[in-house]
Structures are given as C-alpha cells and as structure tokens.
Amino acid sequence: MTKVIKNGTVVTADLTYKADVLIDGGKIIEIGPDLSGDEVLDATDCFVMPGGIDPHTHLEMPFMGTYSADDFATGTRAALAGGTTMVVDFCLPSPGDSLLDALKVWDNKSGRAACDYSYHMAITWWGEQVFDDMKTITEEHGINTFKHFMAYKGALMVNDDELYASFKRCAELGATPLVHAENGDVVAELTAKLLAEGNTGPEAHAYSRPPQVEGEATNRAIMIADMAGAPLYVVHTSCEESHEAIRRAKMQGKRVWGEPLVQHLVLDESEYFNEDWDHAARRVMSPPFRNKQHQDSLWAGLASGTLSCVATDHCAFTTDQKRYGVGDFSKIPNGTGGLEDRLPVLWTYGVETGRITMNEFVAVTSTNIAKILNCYPKKGAILVGADADIVVMDPNAKKTISASTQASAIDYNVFEGVEVSATPRYVLTRGYVAVDNGELKAKEGHGEFVARDPNGTVNTALSKWKDLTAPRPVERTGIPATGV
Ligand code: DUC
Ligand code: ZN
Ligand code: ZN
Ligand code: ZN
C-alpha cells in the first residue's frame, strides 16, 4: 500500500519546492509533481519536512533519587505529537557498572517506543572495563557517541584525567564524545555556600550555576578534546560564555558543535523568581534558564551556524517529584519537558519572527543532527531511499500549549499558555501515520533502534592527525567540510 503526500511544499535544509512525496515500505520512493498512491495525505498550504530528531532525551532515567516520569511509551508519543520522529536517549550506567549491562536495561525499556530511537552511552566512571566496553558498544551495538558529565559531583561527574582518557578512546574508535559542560567542583561549592546562608528556594539553583561555570567547562572540554584528537559535541549550550568557546573553536577549524535547548531560547531566568514555589521548581534544570542577552547569543548562533542543533534535554518530573526539594533546592530533580513542543515553539519564536529561515529550522531540528550523529540520509532527509519520517507542518493551525491536552505524562508544561502558530497536520514514522489530520495515533512498539556506525566524515578526517606526539600535519586546514 503506497501513500502519497500531495500538494505540499517540500522544505529541506537547503531547498524549498512544490512536490508530492510517494511512500512505500516505510521509505520515500519518489518525489515529484502529480504523483498518485493508494492513500492520499493532503498537504495543501503545508510544509513537508524531515521529521524532527531530538538528540537529547532522558526517558525513564534514574536520577536524583527518582525516575524521570516520561518513559519510552509516553515520551515517544509526545515526540510524535509534536512532529519529532526520532529521539536519541542517554543510556546511563551507574559508576562502577558495565556499559553492556546498562545497555540491556535500556533495551528492556525502549521496546515500547512509538518512534525510532538511538542511544548515547554515558561514561560515568573510568577503568579497564569501560575502555574495553567502549569498543564493543561502538563496533557491535551501533552507538558512536559517548556522554560525559562534568557536573553532578559525587554522582555522575568525571574528572579531567577520565575525560582525556575517554576522549582518546573515542578518537581511536571513530566515536564522538559529548559533554555536559559545567564545572562541578565550583557548582558544589556555590551550592553549599548558598544553602549555608539560608538560600534554599528554587531561585538559588540559578545562582549556583552561573554562566561562568558553563563557559569554563566548555573551554576545558574543547581543549581536552583537541589534545585527544577527538571532535566534541557540547549538549545544552545555554549562554554566551559557552557559545563563545564553541565559536572560537570552530573558527580555528576544530570539530565542535553546540546544542541549545528550545527552553533556553524562549524561557528566561525570571521564571525562578515566580512567587509560586511549584512554578519555579518545575523549571529547575541544568544549566538553568538565562537572561535575554544569552538568549540573543543563542539565536545568533543558530542563524550564523556557530550552533548546530536544537534539542530539549527532555527529562520530565511531576510536581510531586519536584517537591522532594522543598527546603533544599539542590534536591529538586533537575529537568523539564519539551519533546512535544520543540518544533511548534521553535517555529513560532524562530521562523515566524524571521530569526531563522525554514531551511535553517529543518537543519537545526533534524538534518544537522542526523549528519553529526551519522545516520544521514536514512534520517533527516526528504530524499528517495530515506526513511519516510516526515512532518507535514500546517503554518495556519494555531494551538495554545496546555498540560491538559499534552501527551507527556507530567501534570504541567513549562510552555503553558504559549500560543504556537504552527502544528503538525500529519506525522509519519517510517510510513506509519502517527498524527493523522491533527489526531495522535502513535503505536506503542512501532519504534526501531537506529544503529549509527563510527567513523563519520569528521572522525575519519580527524584520525589523520590524531598523534600529537608528532608535529601536526599542515593538511589540518584542508579537512573537508561536512556542512554542519
Ligand atoms: N540536566 C537536567 O536538567 N536534567 C537531566 C540531566 C541534566 O544534565
Ligand atoms: Zn546535561
Ligand atoms: Zn541531559
Ligand atoms: Zn510498525
């Protein structure tokens, strides 16, 4: 049974044109004028774009004494409702645990996914077993990205010697390291000081993690990655200090990418000064929301290409879970939702305002991510042979965001009351119509794991000058561009 998306305007990361899209067996089989198929999806007045890829989610993750409330079933339903057709979730071994055991735990959860998914593997400790497991994970399990927490001291944080060892291992394997860049030692000091002075409310969370801790850690990670001969992906870039470090690194030819979150682009630090404790605590995440100057920096980064992807860091906790931190802000589980809202909110605040073009919107929500994570053009593309992961965005279908109508399992939404100017008319996940004329029909268990090979373009290029004991070859400046 073929399906055809008719009368729409195809928007990709580099082109905008009128065409129909024909789908069979979960793949795009033809793109062109006047196509016909067994089932017709009418895209009149709509934009036909690659489905969103969220490169940063935490579904059913054990964290800060509890589990994030959206699991693979509700989280991926939420994703599809908002036009996201693939999520990349963080597989999190506890310090001391084998990476392969953690992978089994995640595989047990992800069978319920309604859209396709992949994993980043977290490196939360260092030892010979981790060194060995990294090879197995990369070569046999289709995971080419390893995440490192430079914060959460005493829990998930790794130190510089561990970062350097792991980044070198990534370079050997053709994998890409990711960092949560905040100086965990300074955050721990500031947290203790604030609590000792009686600053126990959610607003103190922001004071405990100023932009400087993020800027310092981003710079440090970039330099360590450079010495290790590895590229670097900086998750949740929230401030100018971190963006500046990434921008400078890019201008020097280093392969470094930054990922702002849609929450940081739109919501600011004033949220923490709301007199309602619940309101403020629901917005506690790390890094915290920043002021308008930082937001302007992030928007400029998306427009200029110095920042590459927009994610959510979807790590949703209910109000009851947030209340673990009454009387001590450092016990408020860190994280917010956003999976369902990323595309409509970014469209409204980015495309509608003229800050970014429609093509840039596709690049930062899908195509760049697929290229960096090495699953392009299976994902992130409207091309013959690509998976039929497609969002048909209706730029005239407004909606007011409300927790009462969301798919996510939590009892509030940080974007409550925001009127978005565009919502999906159809969302297809490998050809299955999961949003049909605006109606959510996500199918639990439909999602498949997306294996991502090591040695993407960038890693292959970098391997030429990996050995820093030798003089650095001059061809370094001649590394072919990947366009992201
Ligand atoms: N930040 C959050 O806010 N939640 C999950 C982990 C993280 O780094
Ligand atoms: Zn993080
Ligand atoms: Zn995260
Ligand atoms: Zn299916």
Image: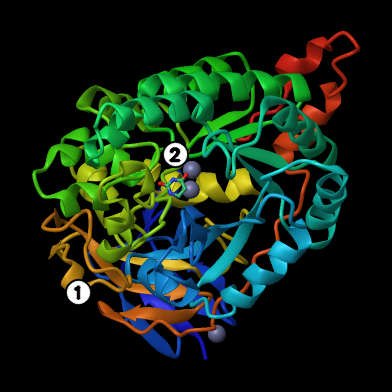
Residue 149: percent from left, percent from top: 58, 39
Residue 450: percent from left, percent from top: 65, 65
| Label 2: which secondary element | loop
Residue 33 shows up from this direction:
no
Residue type of the residue flagged with mark 2: His
What residue is pinned by disc 2?
A: 236
Alpha carbon of mark 1 to alpha carbon of mark 2: how far? Answer: 27 Å
The residue sitting at 39% across, 68% down in the picture is 69
Whether the residue under disc 1 has CB within 8 Å of ligand 1 = no
Q: Residues within 10 Å of mark 2 (few under 14, many from 20)?
A: many
What residue is pinned by disc 1?
A: 405
Asked if residue 233 is positioned above or below residue 94 in the image, the reply reads: above
199 sits to left or right of 218: left
Whether the residue under disc 2 has CB within 8 Å of ligand 2 = yes
> In terms of depth relative to the viewer, which is nearer, 245 or 481?
245
Residues at badges 1 and 2 in contact (C-beta under 8 Å)? no
Residue 466 shows up from this direction:
yes
